[in-house]
Structures are given as structure tokens and as C-alpha cells.
Image: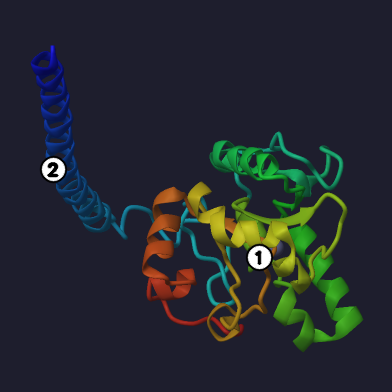
Amino acid sequence: MFKKITFVIFLIIVGIGARYLYAAFKNNKSPTSVTTTQTQSQLSTNTSFNSKQYSTTDPGSIWVIVNKQTPLPLTYEPRDLLVPAVPLRLGAAEMQMKIRSITAVDLTQLFTDSNAAGLQLQFGSGYRSAAYQKVLYDGYVSSMGKSEADRSSARPGHSEHQTGLALDFTRIDGKCHLDTCFADTEEGKWLAQNAYKYGFILRYSVDKEAITGYMFEPWHYRYVGKELAAQMHTTGIKTLEEFFNIGAAPDYN
Ligand SMILES: [Zn+2]
């Protein structure tokens, strides 16, 4: 009887030992293979990025660069404008509540995810025609003077909003609307950290006025597609002007 119990205990110890050895072997194997896979995927992400994939000068390209040096034709109007199915600041009939359809899937997902995170983002302003931009710009000039107006509002043909790829985010309660304090709201912080995952970049970053020609605008985001947004995030390059090496656009000619 005693021998039988000893034998059973012996079997249990051997069993535990074998399982421990197997687990140790497995653990030793898997981290190596995971590391290899990650390295390969990182390499392929970086090397497969093609910076010539889209035009930066064609008004209809998702990579088009519009600034104080490179305007759009005043007559340019995107053909695929729509009103996205997200919380809107104005009535759906307003021109500014439109954005290009090419952004819609990613934009809707951004709103869905930010809402799930408990945030109250709102679509503040999207597409603007050159004619409407003129009305806005003239208003800024008469209220603050030309040089101040040029720091925050674009002249007709020079606004990224005319591409239909840019939008101003705001909060449903209107707090910090078009104000730098938007950067300190939970919504502003979330966008700064996550917008690139949906193909959007913060277009007028802090301390980049000498490059972009505009003051820090924590609410203004530009759709460039997930691939370019991820590449800019990975490389840490904050402006389209620097990424594509086209030169700074601090002012008009
Ligand atoms: Zn804007």
C-alpha cells in the first residue's frame, strides 16, 4: 500500500515536471518568433511606403498641399462632397457640413470610437468654396486687420477647407470652439493622440507657424489617408511641407 502511494506521488511529480519543462520550452520559443515577425512587419511598413504614390499638386489628390505659396484654382470644387453621418454643428443643408466621400468611412469610425471613449466630438466645419472663404477672410480683415487675419484665416484659393479634405472639430457643448484651449480638452487630447489612426493629421502644429504660415490650430485636421498619417506619426514629421520637402510657406508672395 505504502509503495503504491509513493509510486502515485512519483507519477504526479514527473507529470508536473514534464508540463513545466514543456511550458518553459514553449515560452522560450514564442518570444523569439514574435520578435522576428514584428521586426519584419516594421521593416516592410517602412520600406514599402511610396512617397510618390499620390500627387501633392493635383487638387483632387488626398495628398494635395495647399498653403500660402500653393493655392487651389478658385473654381476648384470637389465632386464627391457629402454630409457625413456624425454629430454636426450646423444644419445638414449648410455647405460647411460637407466633406469628401473619400474620408467618410474613416471619419465615421473616428467619431464612433471617440464616442465609445466617452467623448463629445462634433463636426464643426468642413468644405468651403473659394467664394465663401472670401466672405470669411474679408470679415477677419475688417475686424482684426490684414496681418492678424492672415495668421488665422486663409485668403480665397488658399484654404485647405476648399479641398474638402479638411475639417475643424469642436465639442457638442461648444467649449473652446476655434480656441487654442481646445488642445487641453479631452477631445483635443484624444484627437492629438489618435487621429492618425483614421488618416487625419493635425495640420497646423504648435511652433510650426514659420513652416505652415498659420498659428497652432488644435481643432483643424486634414485627411491624408492612413498610410501617410501613419508614416508621419512614425517619423515624427509634423507638417506636409517638411515631409514632402517642398519648402516653408510662412507668407504669401
Ligand atoms: Zn480649419
Q: Secondary structure at mark 1?
A: loop
Quarter of image, res 117 = top right
**Residue reaching furthest top?**
1
Relative to residue 120, is residue 228 depicted above or below? below
Q: On residue 29, which mark appears?
A: 2
**Mark 1 close to ligand 1, CB under 8 Å:** yes
Q: Is residue 83 above or below residue 62?
A: above
Instruction: Name the quadrant where ligand 1 sits.
Output: bottom right
Residue 240 visible here? yes
Figure check: 204 above or below 117: below
Residue in front for this viewpoint, 61 or 1:
1
Q: Position of residue 209 (x, y in %)?
A: 60, 83
Task: Give the class, few, some or many, for how many residues have Cα within 10 Å of label 1's Cα (few <14, many ≥20).
Answer: many
Residue drawn at point x = 13 percent, y = 33 percent:
17
Q: Which residue is mark 1?
A: 159
The amino acid at mark 2 is Lys
Say which residue appears at 61% left-offset and 78% top-offset.
206
Taking the spot 38% from the left edge, 76% from the top edge, the residue there is: 245
Q: Nearer the viewer, residue 193 or 70?
A: 193
Indicate left or right for 70 with 228 as reference.
right
- For marks 2 and 1 on the same chain, the one whose residue lies earlier in the sequence: 2
Hey, which quadrant is residue 216 in on the image? bottom right
Q: Residue furthest right?
A: 143
> Residue 126 got which mark?
none
Residue 169 percent coordinates (x, y): 72, 55
Three-letter code, disc 1: Ser
Question: Where residue 231 sits: x, y (%)?
Answer: 38, 60
Assign the C terminus to one quadrant of the image.
bottom right
Task: Give whichever of 51, 25 is nearer the camera.
Answer: 25
Q: Is residue 253 visible?
A: no
88 relative to 103 in the view: left or right: right
